Image (tube, rainbow, N blue to C red):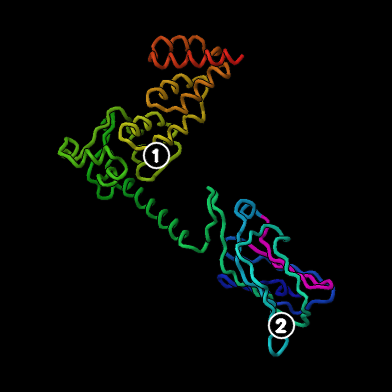
């Protein structure tokens, strides 16, 4: 049998498999063919009845985002003069993961050459982030592409200093060109600053004396969508201060989440102080749990005693309340 006997011809939403001969007891599986973002297979089996199956190739993509398919499938007799056609009632929004999820048992006898014709009306998948299924052929793909292109262009405005109209200067005196409109859109503090006759507006400069050049670069990079993970991790505390100072809520929350991820004996007291200063409840609870519930306070006894001497009284009171609550639990 020639290799073409297993080949499925495709158009953007159409697949056709031409079967030249099929004996009374035969199983045949097509070559893989691509429709949408998945590779698919068709199989045909004749054993008293004719069975047709359609299913996606087993892959990480299929496991994580199995297709939810709507399609019309037909059997077309290409050997008869009038091209006898048998049409399945239709499949709508059916999730197909395995070769048992769509099976068409055909009672009508097809002899000679015939075509399995599949017209995909829609293919959906559930986003990895969750939510409702979304068509892969909807405007969402274009929307994602547009968003990606816009972010790339925005980050180039910063990296290539395209038509900058303000300079951000850090503690070491080095400046970075930026754009008032972008900063104002991302921060209500910057918007107020540039909307009134303040020093920053007249000088076209903003001094951030408590941030190094690297921290300023990371801060602006985040605002422009030019996110760099290594910069973010290296300057989290400075970014948290800037996010709080300039009211960039999403950056503050990102720093909060990140600081929660790697609490250890070396940084727990600093994180606890930071959490208290910026009212980060989850971080404070995480630090207190690490110290008290897991007993790590005994491993850093000297550092902890020194911390209590200089810490805010309100924070010290919270620590002792946590200790007392833990003792009551024993």
Residue 85 locus on image (x, y percent): 68, 81
User: What distance separates the C-alpha of mark 1 from that of mark 2?
Assistant: 60 Å
Nearest the camera: 274 or 238? 274
Q: Is 303 left, or right, of 177 in this rendering?
A: right
Quadrant in the picture for the N terminus: bottom right
Secondary structure state at the residue bearing disc 2: strand
Nearest the camera: 99 or 215? 99
Residue 53 locus on image (x, y percent): 72, 66
- Say which residue label 1 marks: 250
Q: Main secondary structure of the magenta part?
A: strand
Q: Residues within 10 Å of mark 1 (few under 14, many from 20)?
A: few
State yes or no: residue 83 in magenta. Answer: no
Nearest the camera: 168 or 116? 116
Quarter location, residue 80: bottom right
Secondary structure state at the residue bearing disc 1: helix
Residue 324 locus on image (x, y percent): 52, 13
Q: Is 19 left, or right, of 205 in this rendering?
A: right
Q: How many marks?
A: 2
- Say which residue label 2 marks: 77
Question: In the figure, 261 relative to 14: above or below?
Answer: above
* Residue situated furthest bottom in the rendering: 81
Q: Is 54 left, or right, of 269 in this rendering?
A: right
The stretch in magenta equals 39-58
> On residue 158, which mark appears?
none
Nearest the camera: 151 or 269? 269
Q: Is 128 left, or right, of 54 in this rendering?
A: left
Question: In the figure, 157 relative to 229: above or below?
Answer: below
At x 68% / y 62%, what residue is drawn? Answer: 55
* Residue situated furthest front in the rendering: 328
Q: Which of the two discs, 1 and 2, labels the residue nearer the N terminus?
A: 2
Residue 129 locus on image (x, y percent): 53, 47
Badges 1 and 2: C-beta atoms under 8 Å apart? Answer: no
């Amino acid at each position: 049998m020639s290799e073409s006997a297993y080949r499925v011809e495709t158009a953007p939403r159409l697949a056709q498999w031409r079967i030249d001969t099929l004996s009374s007891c035969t199983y045949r599986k097509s070559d893989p063919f691509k429709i949408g973002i998945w590779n698919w297979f068709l199989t045909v089996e004749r054993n008293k009845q004719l069975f047709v199956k359609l299913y996606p190739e087993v892959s990480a993509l299929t496991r994580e985002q199995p297709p939810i398919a709507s399609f019309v499938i037909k059997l077309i007799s290409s050997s008869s003069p009038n091209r006898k056609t048998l049409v399945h009632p239709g499949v709508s929004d059916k999730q197909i993961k395995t070769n048992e999820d769509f099976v068409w048992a055909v009672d009508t006898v097809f002899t000679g050459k015939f075509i399995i014709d599949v017209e995909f009306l829609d293919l959906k998948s559930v986003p990895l982030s969750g939510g409702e299924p979304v068509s892969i052929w909807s405007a969402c793909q274009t929307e994602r592409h547009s968003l990606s292109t816009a972010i790339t262009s925005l980050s180039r405005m910063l990296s290539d200093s395209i038509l900058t109209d303000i300079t951000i200067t850090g503690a070491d005196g080095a400046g970075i060109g930026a754009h008032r409109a972008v900063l104002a859109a991302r921060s209500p503090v910057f918007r107020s600053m540039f909307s009134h006759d303040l020093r920053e507006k007249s000088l076209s400069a903003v001094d951030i004396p408590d941030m190094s050049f690297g921290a300023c670069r990371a801060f602006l990079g985040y605002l422009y969508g030019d996110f760099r993970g290594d910069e973010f991790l290296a300057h989290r505390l400075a970014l948290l201060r800037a996010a709080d100072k300039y009211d960039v809520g999403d950056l503050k929350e990102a720093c909060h989440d990140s600081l929660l991820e790697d609490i250890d004996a070396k940084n727990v007291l600093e994180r606890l102080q930071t959490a208290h200063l910026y009212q980060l409840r989850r971080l404070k609870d995480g630090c207190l749990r690490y110290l008290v519930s897991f007993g790590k306070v005994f491993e850093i006894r000297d550092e902890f005693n020194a911390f209590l001497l200089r810490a805010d009284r309100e924070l010290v009171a919270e620590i002792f309340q946590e200790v007392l609550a833990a003792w009551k639990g024993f």
